[in-house]
Image: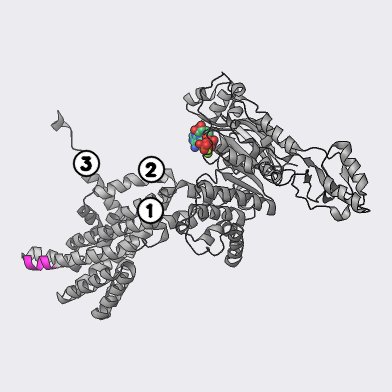
């Protein structure tokens, strides 16, 4: 019986929809593409213009301030090692992509998370979409990104944003919902408007949770940026990709280890931001 | 004009309050209504609170105390009935009016402090002012004043987590006072404190009340606390008011077995005041009286001493029978030089402390008003009789009627 039922044309329908979108919105995606790629180029050029030792010093100092001496020292040593491996340029490229993607992800995720926390209806729409976005294998996002944005860094960052935004949305919503109800009530009792309540009580109290979400977003962004090398995003992922194609395990591991080091630095430094605030001690 | 007038206020929790109201009107019990998926918070509560009055709401857990107080600033939306504050019906207020009311007129002190952990003490105290849109400098100044009022000068820049429970509660109080509200709502504001700090806070609250006359609605589980601070007590049961009155009213004439069970075992000496044992001063001496006149006045009434007052009843002191006799022997013209300085008490002095004073002072103890004019006297005999009469007698108050109700909670600090 079952073989008789014709196949449901899911793939075809999605293709048609995407084609239609590409056709009608290419002016927008083209503009976006130009914009983003210009920004990416400027940042990469700028960072590469700074002498590596100076940049390493600055980043290590930031790490020290944000997360303590040990993280500062680790950051310095790790980056020096990457420089020594002659992987400085791909590291900067990867970092820039992560940075841009994270900024866009936060810019989208924060308001969405707030909206989901404050309105049940929004939450009912947003949360299943997030589940969908997160369960879908990451590669799949790359395919439609190409017709919209072409091969290269922009497609990579768009796919990365889609893949890495959910934790920021989720944890922003969670952080706001977790603010103890008696504090929200106290804010109400003094006649706070919903806006005042959000900015004076809910958001400040949610900072540690939101920062945890952003940290996750950064880590996901890094992993995606590496995968995105398949569509020409370059960077450290590009080196890995090259090594695979040329069957050079040594080079592959070299770049792989570089990615791990970069990941650890990003993780340690951003994990601590927001933890130092007094709200972090409360529950 | 009453400051707060509550009229037939009812609050039903649940998804369909209308249905709950209908069941209530049909005379269904709270339990039946609960079975149908609603909860009766309060039902048909009416009373008034005067300007400057300290009203205490008491009752067992679940009797609707919090619901009542939270209706007053509409943290709970009343299902039916009216609340008039300064003769305005706040149940009809729109969103903006409600925010104004909460910003300026009514403040709340919370049981578990509900301080903002991410703000310093002074920023906590200034929260209400910030919401009103007051400039940073002024709100800091006013918040600091409020902190000083509650004895937290110098703690402004600490965080709440660095303070003890008692101090945190005072920050909560300062936050409420800083906006200079007319009305303070306090939901078990002291119950999270240990007994000693709690006693201090009660004391400070009363001092504060004398300085800045607020209208206060105060919830407590603790009868001793209620008696200590309350001008009037509202007793609630199952969402309804069962009795309203001064502490003495309630203790002397409990309206029901429920109230009676609340009040038995109360230490009467802390509750009764000079009012209950006041006697008219039948004879008084005047500073210009001759010693013989004074002696005759004493003999007529069998007193060993007389109070001496001015013509306008301002207290001067006491003349004892020994002093008067000596004056006769020495041939003094008036008793004026022999007047002894005399302790006096206000009309609301608790019997407890009267007993203390009378153990040192053997003559008549004058009760005076705020202008030091004599209202009457208190004698040792009267105090002892009052205590004997008002000590609950187990054999008469333990009625056979037994409700399926748990014992009222009492303070463990006696
Ligand atoms: N948000 C709510 N939802 C449903 N029912 C509620 C809610 N708040 C209170 N109730 C019910 O209303 C009734 C009165 O509760 P309330 O909190 O006013 O009692 P209370 O006298 O303050 O008790 P306690 O001394 O324990 O604080 C209780 O039966 C309670 O179950
Ligand atoms: Mg309560």
- On whether disc 2 and disc 1 are found on a single subunit, the reply is yes
> Where residue A264 sits: x, y (%)?
23, 64
Locate the N terminus of chain A by quadrant.
top left
Q: Secondary structure at mark 2?
A: helix
Q: Label for residue A124? A: 2
Residue segment shown in magenta: A249-254
Query: Dot 1, how many residues are within 10 Å of its Cα: few (below 14), some (14-19), or many (20+)?
Result: many
The numbered mark, 2 or 3, whose residue comes first in the sequence reads 3
> Where residue B297 sits: x, y (%)?
89, 41
Query: Dot 2, how many residues are within 10 Å of its Cα: few (below 14), some (14-19), or many (20+)?
Result: few
Q: Nearer the viewer, mark 2 or mark 1?
A: 1
Host chain of mark 2: A
In the image, taking residue B8 as reference, residue A167 lies left or right, namely left
> Where residue B318 sits: x, y (%)?
82, 48
**B151 in relation to B344, above or below:** below
- The residue that label 1 is drawn on is A172
In the image, taking residue A234 as reference, residue B65 lies left or right, namely right
Q: Secondary structure at mark 3?
A: loop
Is residue B13 at all visible to an observer of this figure?
no
Q: Quadrant of residue B150?
A: bottom right
Q: Farthest residue toward the top?
A: B400
Foreground pick, B402 / A230: B402
User: Any atom of ligand 1 within 8 Å of the CB at mark 2?
Assistant: no
The numbered mark, 1 or 3, whose residue comes first in the sequence reads 3
Query: Dot 3, how many residues are within 10 Å of its Cα: few (below 14), some (14-19), or many (20+)?
Result: few
- On whether disc 2 and disc 3 are found on a single subunit, the reply is yes
Q: Farthest residue toward the left?
A: A247
- The residue that label 3 is drawn on is A9
Asked if residue B60 lies in the magenta stretch, the reply is no
Q: Farthest residue toward the front?
A: B329
């Amino acid at each position: 019986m079952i073989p008789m039922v014709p196949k449901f044309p899911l793939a075809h329908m999605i293709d048609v929809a995407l084609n239609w979108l590409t056709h009608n919105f290419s002016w927008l995606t083209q503009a976006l593409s130009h914009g983003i790629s210009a920004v990416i180029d400027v940042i990469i050029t700028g960072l590469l213009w700074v002498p590596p030792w100076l940049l390493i010093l600055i980043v290590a100092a930031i790490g020290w301030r944000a997360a303590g001496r040990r993280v500062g020292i680790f950051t310095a040593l790790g980056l020096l090692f990457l420089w020594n491996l002659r992987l400085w340029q791909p590291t900067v490229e990867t970092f820039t992509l992560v940075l841009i993607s994270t900024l866009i992800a936060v810019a989208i995720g924060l308001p969405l998370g707030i909206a989901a926390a404050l309105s049940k209806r929004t939450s009912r729409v947003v949360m299943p979409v997030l589940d969908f976005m997160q369960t879908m294998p990451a590669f799949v996002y790359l395919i439609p990104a190409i017709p919209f944005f072409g091969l290269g860094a922009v497609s990579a960052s768009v796919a990365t944003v889609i893949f890495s935004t959910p934790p920021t949305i989720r944890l922003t919503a969670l952080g706001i919902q977790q603010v103890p109800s008696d504090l929200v009530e106290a804010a109400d009792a003094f006649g706070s408007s919903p806006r005042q309540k959000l900015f004076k009580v809910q958001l400040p109290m949610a900072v540690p949770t939101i920062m945890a979400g952003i940290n996750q977003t950064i880590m996901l962004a890094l992993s995606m940026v590496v995968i995105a090398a398949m569509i020409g995003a370059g960077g450290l992922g590009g080196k890995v990709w090259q090594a695979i194609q040329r069957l050079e395990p040594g080079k592959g591991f070299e770049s792989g280890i570089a990615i791990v080091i970069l990941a650890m630095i990003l993780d340690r430094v951003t994990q601590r931001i927001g933890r130092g605030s007094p709200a972090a001690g409360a529950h | 004009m009453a400051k707060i007038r509550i009229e037939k206020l009812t609050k039903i929790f649940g998804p369909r309050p209308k249905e709950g109201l209908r069941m209530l009107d049909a005379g269904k019990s709270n339990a039946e209504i609960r079975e149908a998926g609603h909860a009766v918070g309060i039902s048909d509560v009416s009373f008034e609170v005067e300007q400057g009055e300290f009203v205490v709401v008491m009752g067992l857990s679940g009797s609707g105390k919090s619901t009542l107080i939270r209706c007053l600033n509409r943290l709970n939306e009343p299902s039916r009935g009216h609340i008039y504050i300064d003769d305005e019906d706040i149940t009809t207020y729109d969103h903006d009016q409600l925010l104004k009311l909460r910003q300026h007129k009514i403040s709340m002190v919370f049981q578990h402090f509900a301080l903002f952990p991410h703000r310093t003490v002074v920023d906590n105290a200034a929260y209400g002012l910030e919401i009103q849109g007051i400039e940073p400098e002024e709100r800091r100044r006013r918040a600091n004043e409020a902190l000083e009022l509650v004895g937290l000068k110098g703690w402004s820049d600490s965080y709440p987590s660095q303070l003890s429970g008692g101090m945190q509660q005072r920050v909560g109080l300062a936050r409420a006072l800083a906006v200079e509200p007319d009305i303070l709502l306090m939901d078990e504001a002291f119950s999270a404190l240990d007994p000693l700090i709690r006693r201090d806070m009660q004391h400070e609250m009363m001092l504060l009340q004398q300085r800045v006359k607020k209208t206060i609605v105060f919830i407590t589980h603790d009868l001793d606390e209620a008696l200590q601070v309350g001008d009037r007590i509202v007793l609630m049961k199952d969402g309804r008011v069962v009795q309203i009155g001064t502490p003495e009213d309630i203790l002397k004439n409990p309206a029901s077995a429920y109230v009676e069970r609340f009040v038995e075992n109360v230490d009467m000496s802390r509750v009764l005041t000079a009012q209950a044992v006041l006697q008219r001063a039948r004879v008084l001496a005047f500073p210009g009286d001759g010693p013989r006149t004074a002696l005759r006045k004493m003999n007529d009434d069998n007193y060993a001493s007389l109070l001496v007052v001015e013509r306008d009843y301002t207290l001067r002191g006491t003349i004892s029978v020994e002093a008067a006799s000596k004056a006769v022997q020495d041939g003094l013209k008036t008793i004026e030089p022999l007047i002894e300085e005399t302790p006096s008490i206000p009309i609301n002095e608790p019997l407890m402390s009267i007993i203390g004073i009378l153990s040192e002072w053997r003559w008549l103890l004058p009760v005076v008003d705020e202008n030091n004019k004599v209202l009457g006297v208190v004698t040792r005999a009267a105090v002892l009789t009052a205590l004997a009469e008002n000590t609950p007698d187990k054999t008469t108050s333990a009625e056979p009627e037994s409700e399926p109700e748990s014992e009222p909670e009492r303070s463990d600090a006696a």
